[in-house]
Image: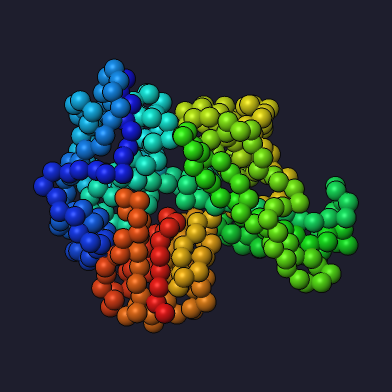
Amino acid sequence: MKRIVVCAFLACSGCAVHLNWRLVKQDSGHVLIPPDVRHPDQTRRTFTVDIAPALAPCPSSGVIAIKSRGTRARFTVTRDDLSKQPNGYLAAWASQLERENCLAPGEGSKLAARIAESVPLDPTAASRLLYPDERQTTAVDIGLQTYLQVVSPLVRERGAPILESPSTLTGTDAALTLTTKAADNLLGYEKTLYSLKPKPGHAGYTIAPVYTDRRLVATGATDRHPAPTTDYLQFPPDAAFYRLFYESWRNDFSALVIAARTPTDLDQATDKLQASGASASCQDVNNEMCLQIPKDVAVNPMISVTVNGDDVLLNRGSRLANAITAAGDKNPGAILPKLRVSKPWNGRAVPLSFDPADAAILTLPLHGGEIVNWR
């Protein structure tokens, strides 16, 4: 089969490249118009990508048509058909192409993102198509724009309690708050930030610590270190693609992070875990490529956004308003006349134009790499 390699330079027929993204209001709501799309009402789009010579073309789906010729593949996307698809449709579609060996390993996420920005879409719809509902799947794909924040305790004695009872648990399906008192065994805690870096000359990424902030209970001081006391995310050198599984009603473990050499291998390992039901564990897959996270350690997927020149870490699924409040401004609506936003496109940050009198910009989903300024 023909393996499609997604390149940075993509062509389209009958389109003009603008200098910015555009968020505009329509009768049905708001649409986000990519820089290389002329009109907000454009409903159909055809563009091409470079491909590597191979045996046969990739199959079209009922939503996305694919035609290959020579070293190019032509994709045709219809906005209405795309908008009707379920959560995570584009991620699943691109993964299927990789499993059929007509898309090079690791290129699925790039192609899915390109499809999501090929036609004007409601910003929430575009985000929904790229990412499954993590509360339903209890799994998170760890990609290039994802950081991992690992919060772990520092203790006098391993295995001894770090919290005293009784404790109070409150919250909702989306968030829980535990109120309790630290035991004498707890010396403090560490927050370690991990990033993904592309493997030179190979598909996939490596996970490496960026820094560790270590806070001691006795002094209340926080010191920065280059690495954690315990590295909970050490994988073999050939690990390249990663997926985080949360604790949920579907399983009995606290959290698992699995890795694989290719996205197809990662999907196969996922199928094995899910087939085991609530008893799933690293014993069901390649143990070297599976890490079970201790129950007293938290692994949080994050994204990084630049706000007024500073890097700000946010939870995945955050909106623009969350970035503004995280930077210390508690009234996002008041800064709209001064707000400037840039959003990644084709490997670079491109300005996003919007009506400063319309607060809809504050609901823009963030995927990581955005630049926000108002000072």
Asked whether residue 31 appears in the rendered view, the answer is: no
* Horizontal arrangement in the rendering, residue 33 relative to residue 361 (left or right): left
Image: 214 above or below 287: below
Residue sticking out furthest to the left: 14
Which quarter of the figure has residue 60?
A: top left
Front residue of 241 and 297: 241
The residue located at (14%, 50%) in the rendering is 15
Quarter of the image for the N terminus: give it.
Answer: top left
- Residue 77 % position (x, y): 21, 41
Q: Position of residue 280 (x, y in %)?
A: 64, 32
Task: From the top left corner, tell me how far across and down residue 186 is, in percent.
Answer: 83, 60
Question: Between 309 and 153, which is closer to the camera in this rendering?
Answer: 309
- The residue lying at 52 percent from left, 77 percent from top is 328
* Colour convention of the picture: rainbow
- Residue lying at the far top in this picture: please name it: 55
Question: Is 338 placed above or below 88 here?
Answer: below
Q: Position of residue 344 (x, y in %)?
A: 36, 56
Image side of residue 297 versus residue 241, left or right: right
Specify whether 87 is left or right of 152. Answer: left
Image-based side of 179 in relation to 25, left or right? right
**Which residue is pictured at 13% across the width and 43% down the height?**
13
Along the viewing direction, whichever of 136 and 142 lies nearer the viewer: 142
Q: Pick out the residue farthest to the front.
A: 201
